[in-house]
Each structure stands twice: as C-alpha cells, then as structure tokens.
Image (cartoon, grey):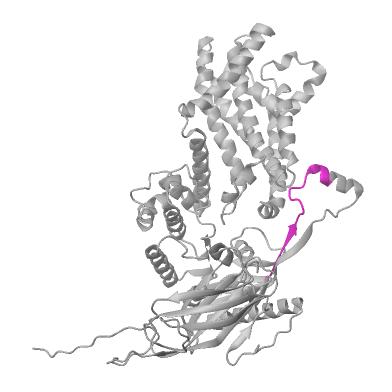
Amino acid sequence: MPEILIAEGVSKRFKLHRNRPTTLKETVIRRLTGRYDNGSTTYWALRDVSFSLEQGRRLGIIGHNGAGKSTLLRLVCGLGRPTKGEIRRMGHVGSLLELGSGFNPEMTGRENLMTGGILSGLTKGQVTASQDEIIAFAELEEFIDQPVRTYSTGMYLRLAFATAIHFDSDFLVVDEVLAVGDSRFKQKCQQRLRLLRISGKSLIIVSHDLEQIRALCDEVLVLEEGRVEIQGNPEDAIKCYADLMRRRTERRAAELGIAIRPNLKTEQGIRLGTQEATICAVHLLDGENRNIDHLISGSSLAIEIEYLVQRPLPDMALTLGIFSENNVKCFETSIASIRTTFGQLAEKGTFRCHLPELPLLAGRYYVNLSLHPMDWSYVYDNHWQMHPLQVMNEKTMLAYVSGVVLVRPDWSFRTKE
Amino acid sequence: MKNFTHHRDLILNLARRNFILAYKGSTLGILWSALLPLSQLLVLVFVFRRILPLGIEDFPAFVFAALLPWNWFSNSINSASNIFLVNRDLMRQPHFAPRTLVVVDALTNLLTYLISLPILLALLTLHGRGVTISLLFFPLLVLIQGILIVGLSLIIATLNVFYRDVAHIVSVAVMLLFWFTPVFYQSKIVPEKYHFLYTLNPMAVLVESYRAVFFGTPLEWSSLLLSFILSVMLCGLGYIIYQRQLHDIIDAI
C-alpha cells in the first residue's frame, strides 16, 4: 500500500515566554540595549520524530500527558510548521480535533453544519447534498433549526462529530474518539470508523484508553518526552508503554534517593513504586467480613486497602483491577482523585471496595492495585499479582463452561417431531 | 475549479455569518447598520452648517458620499487588529487559511456600506441631482479600496499577534487620518503646499473620487492611478509579511 503520510525527523520547538505578549516597547529597548535575553526559554515538544502511515492503516498514538501527542497531531493537520524535519501528506486530512470548535452558539444547527462542512473543505453544493444524511446521523431532525446554544453537550458533540466525519478525506485524525454522547451513539461512531477503514481511509487515533487502542489500531506509536519510543504492533507498544511507566517510577525513586528493590518483601508477584505512598496491607473479605483467599463464583467480595503516606502528598489516584492468570483484565475501577472523592488525604487509612457479586468463572485471578500521582506518570506503589484470588465453581454446574465471565448456560434438547 | 468554488463559498458563508451575528436579537436588526452613519451625518451637518458653516452646496449628500466609504475603511482597519486573536477557533481548522478572515471582514463591512447606499441616493434625489453615467466607475473604486483594506489589514493583523501595541497605534492613526481625509471638507481649501500629502493618502483620493462619481463631476485619473498602485503595493507587502509569519502566527495564537 502506498504511504499517505510521512514524517521525517520532525522536531518542534516552542518558546516559553515569561510574560507572553511582547510589547513594542520591550522589543525596542531590547534592540537598543543589545540584550536579547528576555527570560524566554525554549523547549522541544518533539524531537526527531519519524514515522509513516500507509493507506488504509490505523495508527494509534499513546504517550503520557505532555509527551507531545497534541503537538504532533497539530503538525500532521498542517497547523504550524516543524522547526526541523518535514511532514509530507499525500492526501486530504480530516480532523476530529477540537470537535465543533468552528461552531457559533447563536447560529442554528443547520447553519453551523453548513459552516463546518465548508470549513472542512467542501463547497456549498456538496454540503447541501449530504445535509439530510448528516442530520439523520446526528439524530437531530427536530432541533436542527434551533440555535446551537440551546443544545445539550451530547447534542452539540453529535452534530460536530457527524459533520466532521461525513466529509470525504483520505485520512482522519481523531483525538480521544468516542468520548461522544451516549453509549449507543458511541457504537454508531465506532461503526462509522470501521466503515471508513473498509473504504480504504487511514486513521490516526490518540487515546488514553489502551483497550481502545488495542481494539482499533493496526500499529501504535509510543511517544515519550517528544521522542518516538517505538512504532510497532499494539501488543508490543502497550508493553513498551507499561515499561516506560516502570522506568519513570525508577527515575523518580532515584531522585528521591529511594533504592528500589524489584521484589520489595513480597512473597509473590511484583511490587514497584517510589513508596511515597504505600499500600501496607490488603484484605480480601467475604460477605461476613472474614478474610478469604478463595471465593464461590458470583458471591460478594470486599477488598480493603490500608495505605500509609510516607511523605506529604496533596492528593493521589488509586486503581483496583481483577486480572485473570494470563493477564486478561476482567474488571478495573479507579479513583482519579482521592481528595475530591473522599476529602483531604489522611496520612493513613483504609479504602474499602465492595463488589456485591463477582461473576467470574472458576480459576485463579489476581487483585492488582496501584497508587499514582495525579498525572498517572509513574507509580507510588503497585501491587501486581501479589494478591491471588481463587474462584471456585458453584456446586451445581451441569455443562462445561470456560472463559472468565460467569454465565449459567441452560441447555435442552428436542428431536424433530 | 473546485478550489475556487470552495473559497468563494467559504468567504460568503463566513461574511453572511458575521453579518447575521452582528444584528441577531436586536429589534431594529439590520437597520442599525444604516442608523450609525445617519447619526454621524446629523452631527456633521449640524456642526458644519449651523456652527461653523463651510458653505458647501448640498452638504448632507456631500458628507454622506464620503462618510460611507470612510466607515468601511475605519471599521475594517480597526477590527483587523484582533481578527486573528478572536477567531482562534477557525484558525485551528486544518484547511483554513487565516488570511481568509481579513477578506471576510472587509466584505462584511462593505455589505454595511452597500446597505446605506439607497439613503445616499435618496439624499441626492432630494437635492434634485440625478444619477449620472459616472456611477459606472463605482465598482472600480470599491475594488481599489478593497485592495487597500485587505493589504493594510493583513499587515496590522499579523503584527498585532506579536506586538499587542499595534491595536492601540492603529486606532489612534485611524482617528487622526479622519481629519486628514476630506470627509466633511473639500480638498480644494487645503493650502497648495500640502496637496502632495493628499495625493499620497489613498483614502483622500478615494473619498473625493466617490464624491465625483455620485455628483457626476470628472474624476482625477492620475491621482486615482497612483492610489491604485499604492494599494496594490500595500497589498503585496501585506501578503509577504503575512506569509512569512504565517507559521509563527499559528503557534502564537
């Protein structure tokens, strides 16, 4: 397949001004006094990034906040120019970045649709021709002649998404897809993206959701501090991304002067983290609050996590997941900010997560836990495969079942009469 | 060809949108675009007929014929300063060329001008003056002024992204230029030794030319040609400045 996008050695430098808009006075004074240093520093958002995208492929871009994803996307769209290197586009780019940003709240949906369509590169005639289809896709038939300011967020995004995706482009750039509207509309969008793929369109997708990246992309690029860490198949890339997280944690620990021991007094599994906050004990409890290490399929489970903050932290994030023995994520929940959820972060305490029923089939599972700083850039403490949970079958299981989810198949049989 | 249609549709759509937004929700709506120059006219007529009589024949039409193009100029130039800054959203669209904004703004203000034209024609009729054949040159003057406005706006809009003082300098300059442009007086009364300044001011030449077109008096082709050349040169200069800074504009926005 021919390549549709090539980036070669792309670097982008930004000037960081201490006090942004320069005034004429400052410039004049600087020129007169011959001092060019106005306290502005430069920083490289991208360094020597090279990759290519073949027609019909879907490329995912992942990276920690500030790794340069947005800068790269903007350059791909032709907004701004690389400081070094070059980006070649062999086709028309469609963008789902900043959905609906060209919309004006005072104008009606129909008028905004027209403006949006023309902005994405069409003529008035072409927009008029596909207008009804777009309105139908966005499911806004009744409201299309109302001003957009009266729309709900969901309606607004639906219109923006429908407008943006309907226009013919050779490749689409999508940022955090499918954060659009309700789950049914999300399905529709995913469907639409799949269709685009079948018709030979290429996609570039940026997402924080690794599962989504795994499901949608053929290839994944991992960015770290403006550099390409890896471009490869999703599995390798996601592994690499997890690896980065570990390396960042080690670096952070080194800064703090904490020696990280790979198996920090654990009997099993892997423990990692800077230990700025630690998980000191984890209890798995059944319905009667008894400590357990095994559980009957479908019964209740409570997980208690005792933590201790080793050095003052304003806030942190917590994730709890149940993974199968071969690392399939069965379920995960996270609290992005302890402080907003439970108030001021105490020096120590216990989080309790109650799962009224845990519909897992028999097998060996692990409860994996981690504490993170707010930007998820590394881990304070991560317990990986340290807390096993044996799930046992209910007594009466007639037919053979396998997998992870507890379902009770009801078989029957009849002969043709 | 598709490209041309696309650009035309884009410019017309945005101009229409600006125009609708300016008057949406107000009771008098589009009438406001005529009421503003009318109120300016009333003040000027009162001052220069009753307080400081200038003794110019058919003074209301005389002033109005110059005031309308002047407003087109000053409104466009004043809004050019912040045009990139207030339209960040549009500038972030992948295929949008920011220079479009400058053209759209000039066009929106031209529309305001054209809407008030019937009032001018009515004034002329009231004075017993008919429309003459020289009105055919009107589109030519609009074209020259359009080039001038787009050129100046490109320069101002680009510079103001980097130096926010430009907006203030421009509003002072436009205010001063009003007095050096024969809107409410005749350039005849200007002393001979300052005449060259007036021929170098394209707005002065244009304003006089509009008047000639509406009053059916002969046009001064040589100064008009000079203004045309000046406008084209400014437009070229504006384009070069803009094109050079384009990528920095997008980063700075």
Give x and y (percent) for residue A132.
35, 52
Residue at the (71%, 27%) spot, across then down:
B175
Judging depth in this view, the residue of A314 and A174 nearest the camera is A314
Q: Is residue A334 left or right of residue A43?
A: left
Judge whether B160 appears above or below B72 on screen. below
Residue at the (29%, 84%) spot, across then down:
A408
Residue at the (53%, 32%) spot, across then down:
B111
Give x and y (percent) for residue A28.
85, 44
Q: Quadrant of residue A270?
A: bottom right
Give x and y (percent) for residue A368.
53, 82
Give x and y (percent) for residue A400.
31, 93
Q: Quadrant of residue B194?
A: top right
Q: Looking at the image, can residue B53 be seen?
A: no
Judging depth in this view, the residue of A40 and B187 nearest the camera is A40
Furthest residue in direction left, as rendered: A417
Judge whether B122 appears above or below A125 on screen. above
Q: Looking at the image, can residue B107 be seen?
A: yes
Judge whether B48 appears above or below A112 on screen. above
Q: Is residue B190 left or right of residue A132?
A: right
Judging depth in this view, the residue of A405 and B233 nearest the camera is A405
Magenta-drawn segment:
A9-27
